[in-house]
Every structure is written in C-alpha cells, then in structure tokens.
Image (cartoon, helix red, strand yellow):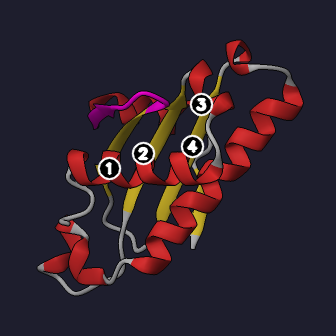
Amino acid sequence: MLESLKGDRAFRRMRKGRAVYVKEFGIKWLPLNEESVQVGIVVNRKVGNAVIRNKVRRRLREALLSILRENPIENFAQQAQFKKKPAFSLIIIVRPIAAKADYWQLKASLHYALRKGGVLCN
C-alpha cells in the first residue's frame, strides 16, 4: 500500500506541495493521479544515531499505515468525490524532538497534521 518516494526528482517535485508543521515533524504532500501512496521520511543526523533515526522512521511508517487502515475512503479529501483509493505523495521531515516521542504521540501528531493539511477530511 505504501511505496517509497525515490529519487531527487521526486523530492524536488514535492517543494510545490502543501506544508504543515507540528512539534515533532513537518509534512509536505501532493495529490497523485495514480492509486498509490508514496512516502519519503527524512530524518536528519541531529535526531540521533542510526538506531534512533531508524526507530523514528519505523514508528512513523507504521503510524501512517495504521491511519490509512483506520480511515475509510470517504475521509480522504481528494478521493471522496471520485470513490477511489487514496493517492498522494507525502514527505515527513522529522525534527529532533521526535526521538523522545513514543509511537502514540507520533501517530496522534501525524493524524492531526494530515487533517490540518487537508489530506484527511475529519
């Protein structure tokens, strides 16, 4: 269900996306024509060593998967009118404070950011 956002070109294209920032991270997203969710998680070295960076990355990926599973298609802004699967590109830019947050805090912040950014309707 989740595809990895790969290549410099894909990340540069995301500069045109809508941005939302919360305490733990910022997100940028763009709607897609394809029926897929492309995700890129950017974790800087300031967050911590490799173990901590990977732990944050895994937690965010699982939180996003959980949010996608829990929400019906009608909750996704772009797809509600077309009755198709969610399709968007998303970049999550992690801030150092995310290393101290647990899974539930990250999931709540991600859900809030997706609603605030217009990816989720409610």
In front of the other: 7 or 88: 88
Residue 22 relative to residue 94: left or right: left
Which residue appears at 47% of the width and 63% of the height?
Answer: 37
Q: Secondary structure at mark 3?
A: helix
Earlier in the chain: of badge 3 and badge 1, it is 3
For the residues labelled 2 and 1, say whether their Cβ atoms are less than 8 Å apart.
yes
For the residues labelled 4 and 2, say whether their Cβ atoms are less than 8 Å apart.
no
Which mark identifies residue 112?
Answer: 1
Which mark identifies residue 40?
Answer: 4
Q: Mark 1: which amino acid?
A: Tyr
The residue singled out by tag 3 in the image is 98
Q: Specify few, some or many for label 4: CA neighbours under 10 Å numbering under 14, 14-19, or 20 or more.
A: many
Q: Mark 4: which amino acid?
A: Gly
Which mark identifies residue 102?
Answer: none
Residue 20 relative to residue 37: left or right: left
Which mark identifies residue 109?
Answer: 2
Q: In whole angstroms, how far apart are the C-alphas of marks 4 and 3?
A: 16 Å
